[in-house]
Image (cartoon, grey):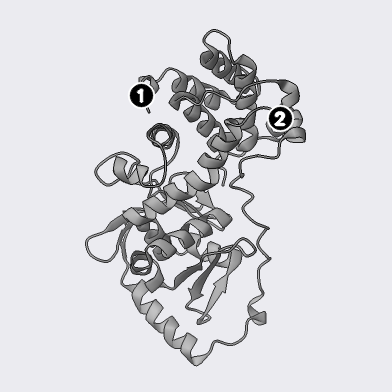
Amino acid sequence: MRPLTASQGVVALLERWVSELERGSSGAALDLDDLSPPFPGRTPPEANPPASEAELQQADAVRAARAEIRPQGAVFNLLGSAQIVLAQEGGKLVHRGTVGIRGPCAPSREEWLGLGLKNAQAHALEFVLTWFGAPFDSATGGEDPSWGTWPFSGRALIDVLARWKHQDSAAFNAHLGRLGIDVTLGQPSCPSSLTVIDVEQGSPIGGREALSLLGEDARLFAALAQAGRERSAQLAQLRFIAEKALLPLLAWAGQDAPAEEASPGLSLTPRMLALLLHAELRLGFRGSSKLAALAREDTGKPRAEERSAQRFAAELHAAGRTREANEVRRILYSPELATALA
């Protein structure tokens, strides 16, 4: 689930940055692109067994429910008064989003803290998602659709939807279940799964075929985008980021360095935590581990936090990542992160 794709040259540079860390580290944060093994290939239509009578009846009910989503040009009218405005960009359906991380339609601070985060952690994550993430209800279609604030795609998208259904099945079914979209929460030995009813075949499909249908059927895509406005879906997104990105990052970045380096752990101020989360969002674990390594080198030096962030920005700029370098400097000098939080 990586919003930006680095060139091979930049990937090679990042690999060189952290090669020594990876040889000695066993506490790496989980990369959201590596949640589970790849999807199986597409199943030829002729290989699918004929739909049963019960499946055909279910498909009829799903077809009727989808027909209730009424498109009027680019505006899709969903149940109640909900409306979603879709666009086409590069041959893909797009919903840029309307529900930001802050505002009257977003979770309250009490709900953020209810995820098990400390105030400083919630503040840093909220800052990064507000300025560098996406709205809760944003989505991009195509064969590999993405959704939400990080944003989530592939296995991560399926896992977030499964967690949402597990936490609030009524809301999930009202938005997606009635349209023939279903998810099963995975276990350590079995990843979460997604099925979508193909009304043409009259039976459910799974894996990449299901994701593709979700990202290419305009009605289903509009429903997915609208689901991001549901509070329990927003909390499922935040809980997933906290569990799969923030908390492992805290455990790794805050731990003691290898004994032979005789270097203390990082001082995780809200600003440094925001810098690490931004690096994780834009560059994955390789980026956040590089920044952590620089911060450890600068521990105890005057203006250590500023020094390590500026060094990181300079290396990003030299690698051709000017946008990310400028974003690092924006975080470094933002007044929103100036006050230390308990």
Name the kind of residue labelled 1 in the image: Glu
Residue 98 appears in the picture as rendered: no
| Residue at point 27%, 47% (across, down) | 105
Name the kind of residue labelled 2 in the image: Val
Q: Which residue is mark 1?
A: 336
Q: Is residue 151 above or below residue 141?
A: above
Q: In 3D space, how far apart are the residues under numbered discs 2 and 1 (Cα atoms)?
A: 30 Å
Tag 1 secondary structure: helix
Quarter containing the C terminus? top left
Q: Which residue is mark 2?
A: 18
Q: Which mark is residue 159?
A: none
Residue 178: percent from left, percent from top: 37, 73
Query: Total marks drawn?
Result: 2
| Residue at point 23%, 65% (across, down) | 80
Residue 25: percent from left, percent from top: 71, 35
Asked whether, in this view, residue 267 is left or right of residue 290, the answer is: left
Residue 56: percent from left, percent from top: 47, 87
Residue 61: percent from left, percent from top: 38, 81
Which of pointers 2 and 1 lies earlier in the amino acid sequence? 2
Tag 2 secondary structure: helix
Residue 273 appears in the picture as rendered: yes
